[in-house]
Amino acid sequence: MNTIEYDDLYAKLYDKLNKEGQEQLDKLLDIIRKEFIIKIKRWLNIP
């Protein structure tokens, strides 16, 4: 899945959610991003 497909999918999902759902999605994506950054740093041996 390329970035354009992901952005489009995210936008469609975000539009379907109410305010509470949008906040929960933002929190979830924030956690996923942090975990992903931690894994990349470990893989590259960056402290």
Image (spheres, helix red, strand yellow):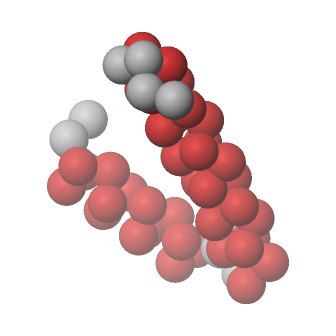
Give the residue displayed 41% in from the left and 70% down from the top. Answer: 11
17 up-or-down from 40: above or below:
below
Q: Nearer the viewer, residue 26 or 12?
A: 26
Give the residue displayed 19% in from the left and 55% down from the top. Answer: 4
Give the residue displayed 26% in from the left and 35% down from the top. Answer: 1
Q: Position of residue 27 (x, y in %)?
A: 71, 61
Q: For this view, does 10 lie left or right of residue 24?
A: left
36 up-or-down from 32: above or below:
above
Viewer can see residue 25: no
Q: For this view, does 6 lie left or right of residue 11?
A: left
Viewer can see residue 2: yes
10 up-or-down from 41: above or below:
below
27 up-or-down from 40: above or below:
below
- Quarter of the image for residue 20 reads bottom right
Q: Nearer the viewer, residue 46 or 38?
A: 46
Q: Position of residue 13 (x, y in %)?
A: 51, 64
